[in-house]
Image: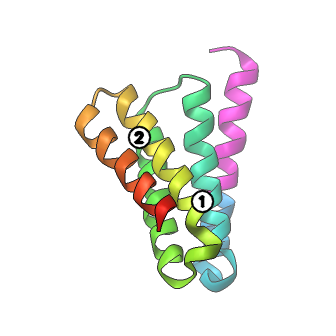
Amino acid sequence: MDARREEALEATGQAVDLSQRLAAARPDAFEPHLARSLWASAWARMALQHVDVELIQHAREAVERYEGLYVVRPSAFRDDLAGALDTLAGALDAVGDVAEARDARRRAADVRSS
């Protein structure tokens, strides 16, 4: 992997680490930032074709966190949850889990239509 790609992955990892610390201290203020950082990390890994365990972990955790936020404020987090589910679907496709990817896409469509 070239140096710029490595730098990009390092930057998204640092954003996740910082967001995790902030959300641990003040979840009410920083939970959305953590969800966004996780989603951005997963998306960047997909865009850079860097398919690894961290891609799936970050995609799943982003969805979980957005699901929690969506329950409290559906209109504020509908698009983010649907987008995170789409990213998870792409990640699952990349590792060959077609059935679970299809389920994530269906969930994204359901969220968008709710």
Residue furthest front in the image: 113
Q: Residue at x 46, y 51 (%)?
A: 85
Residue 13 pos. (x, y %): 63, 46
**Element at label 1:** helix
Sooner in the amino-acid sequence: mark 2 or mark 1: 1
**Which type of secondary structure does the marked residue at label 2 adopt?**
helix
Location of residue 79 (image quadrant): bottom right
Q: Which residue is mark 2?
A: 89
Q: Amino acid at mark 1?
A: Asp
Nearer to me, 5 or 74: 74
Q: Amino acid at mark 2?
A: Ala
Q: Is residue 15 magenta?
A: yes
- The front one of 34 and 97 is 97
- Seen from this angle, which residue lies furthest top? 2
Q: Look at the magenta stretch and give its main secondary structure.
A: helix
Magenta region includes residue 11: yes
Please report the residue visible at 65 percent of the width from the left and 35 percent of the height from the top. Answer: 9
Residue 2, image x, y percentages? 69, 14
Vertical placement of 60 versus 77: above or below?
A: above
Res 77 quadrant in image = bottom right
Magenta part of the chain: 1-16
Does residue 85 appear to the left or right of 42 in the view shown? left
- Residue for badge 1: 80
Disc assigned to residue 34: none
Residue 21 x %, y %:
63, 69
Instruction: Work out whether 80 lies above or below 97.
Output: below
- In space, the residues marked 2 and 1 are separated at their CA atoms by 14 Å
Q: How is the image coloured?
A: rainbow
Seen at 47% across and 80% down, the residue is 71
